[in-house]
Amino acid sequence: MTRILDTINDPEQLRALTTEQMQQLAEEIRREIIEKVSVKGGHLAPNLGVVELTMALHYVFDTPKDLLVWDIGHQAYVHKLLTGRRDRFHTIRQFGGLSGYLRREESPYDVFGASHASTSISAALGLAAARDLQGEQRKVVAIIGDGALTGGMALEAINNAGSLKKNLIVVLNDNNKSISDNVGAINHYLGKLRQLQTSRSYQRLREMAKGSIEKLPMVGDKAREAAGRAEMSFKNFVLHSKSGLIFEELGFKFFGPFDGHDIPLLVDVFENIKQVEGPVMVQVVTKKGKGWEYAEEDSTKWHGPGAFDYTTGTIKKNAADPPTYTDIFATTLVELAEKDTSIVGITAAMAEGTGLKKMQQRFPERYFDVGIAEQHAVTFAAGLAVGGMRPVVAIYSTFMQRAFDQVIHDVCMQNLHVVLAMDRAGIVGEDGPTQHGVFDIAFMRLIPNMKVMAPKDENELRHMLYTATYMDGPISLRYPRGKGMGIPLDSELHALEIGKAELLSPATLALAEQQECAILAFGATVAQAEVAAKELAEEGISVAVVNARWAKPLDEELIIRLAKGTGRLVTIEDHVVAGGFGSAVLELLESRGIRDINVRVIGCPDKPIEHGALSILKELHGLSSAHLKDVVRDMVRSEAKGYELAH
Ligand SMILES: Cc1ncc(C[n+]2csc(CCOP(=O)(O)OP(=O)(O)O)c2C)c(N)n1
């Protein structure tokens, strides 16, 4: 039987469907998403929750002329299926395939790129202001989750929108979930509104109001407008009588809560709301994971699973895989917190992703989930530090970008002892350009008082976390996504010497100085350096290998001696070349007037790094041992002098 989905190439075709066909299409979309995501993994529960909502939005609004601005974009799979990307949907998140988020280059329907949270209302307000300045007629709709609404930027945008009074529609996709349970006072407040949807008296009143609307002759805009007004004033009445309605006070007309899985209702609501002037917020209550029992039951587990068997609901995992860096970080933190009651853990809505869930389970009173609020998380930690605690803030490298000023202004300028633990540092793979953690060495290194380190493996991560916890002042610690190297873990932790690198081979610095070249590797690239050096030795090329450990302060003595001794240095890092570890080495050499040697800096290029499997991206951007060998061979053969960026 032909699926209705196979006949939908753009939203125009959706608009021609009957209610029954829409219901069938919703089921087909769910099946398509579950089946395709099961192959390689991706965002599942967020998408299953917005099937009807996305259909209703494209049905009512004249997309792409009207603009839909999705927050984060992890829930935009349905949007992709309805906007001409059905045939390529099986390529999602794979190298050369569709992005797992929104991408302007991918489709005119992707109005504004995203993947970091809480940007949609700001972007939509900007689009609304541009529309008005240019005298255009179009609707602008931001769709934001209750999780993303905890981000300060969303609240800044609401503050601005409420006074600008532009025509702007904000759809609040309220599933009462961030990745884990949503947190915070605003969520608590939304919860009170949510309860209205299930309260019997509200339902009865709603039915009465709906009945009266349906009796109106729905001919033309005016009648619709009238109907809209009737329904809305009713909602306002109900809601006003139940609560203070914060959003109304802030200049928005607030409607809802509405059942986000009832297509006719949603169509009706959006048709009405389209007519309303000024900033409007519509609360739509959805169930994350809707329509697939496993995801409905545990939407956190199914938020963004890897490959899985959709018939049994089991996520495919290799039992022999070593623990991840995240696991090691979290168990070590708990171990340290067992012995030291001043240690506290802070996450910005990433309890599972950062592993801090373990801290929550063991020491709930010393664990803080502050919501999607990285800026606040860092300044909150600074306050804890002033108050005598030892805060460890665990934030992915990419999201730490949000808190740059807080790291400078609140932590570093006051030289406070805050540990910034950055998971997912380096290229992260399928999540793509906006999520690769390839800027943190640069933005941390430039701040006075900050120290920057990265472990070569998970065992060293344990010692580094210990070191970071028991030294003074601000420190950043970066480690990669995914599984560790599977090496044994030391049970006794010790402090590493600040600014001291580890010479891995040959055995002494005196011998290392006599090699033809030295590789200085930072963090997760040490393994490639060791492989490259071993294989080059088989070719007769002698190479010293250094685990740099610190990008700030550098092990200046070791670097200078190797530079002068070997005359050839290669640096490698999982980070952009600009401002990174190699850049720090160049600054050191230049400051000491060491120019008559050959230095190559390997790292990521000065352009967005695409999405795809980690192995493909690392190969492509020269972070493989094969590329490292090519670079060393080339240096050893030539008599070139000077500094060169390999990208
Ligand atoms: C600045 C930032 N911090 C953290 C994240 C990680 N993250 C991705 S989705 C998500 C939860 C979003 O919740 P919500 O907006 O309610 O959407 P839902 O998944 O529930 O549909 C989080 C915390 C992010 N994308 N951006």
Image: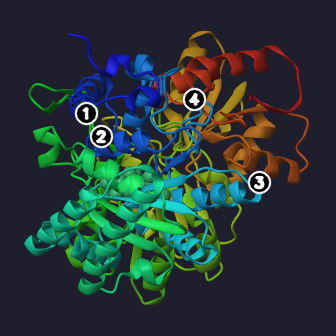
Work out how far the residue at label 1 is from the one at label 2, CA to CA, in angstroms: 6 Å
Residue at the disc numbered 3: 134
Going from the N terminus, do you reach mark 2 or mark 4 first?
A: 2
Query: Quadrant of the image for the C terminus?
Result: top right
Query: What label does residue 51 carry, if any?
Result: 2
Disc on res. 26: 1
Among numbered discs 3 and 4, the one appearing first in the sequence = 4
Q: Position of residue 543 (x, y in %)?
A: 64, 26
Label 2 within 8 A of ligand 1 by Cβ: no
Please state the quadrant of the image where ligand 1 appears.
Answer: bottom left
Q: Position of residue 438 (x, y in %)?
A: 59, 44
User: Pointers 3 and 2 in contact (CB under 8 A)?
Assistant: no
Q: Nearer the viewer, residue 167 or 518?
A: 167
Instruction: Examine the rendered structure and indicate whether residue 32 appears above or below residue 2.
Output: below
* Mark 4 residue type: Glu
Residue drawn at (30%, 28%), measured in percent from left and top?
Answer: 37
Give the Cα separation between the discs numbered 3 and 2: 33 Å
Q: Position of residue 597 (x, y in %)?
A: 85, 33
Label 2, label 4: how many angstroms apart (C-alpha)?
A: 21 Å
Q: Is residue 532 above or below residue 505?
A: above
Q: Residues within 10 Å of mark 2 (few under 14, many from 20)?
A: many
Residue at mark 4: 106
Please provide percent x and percent y for residue 359: 25, 66
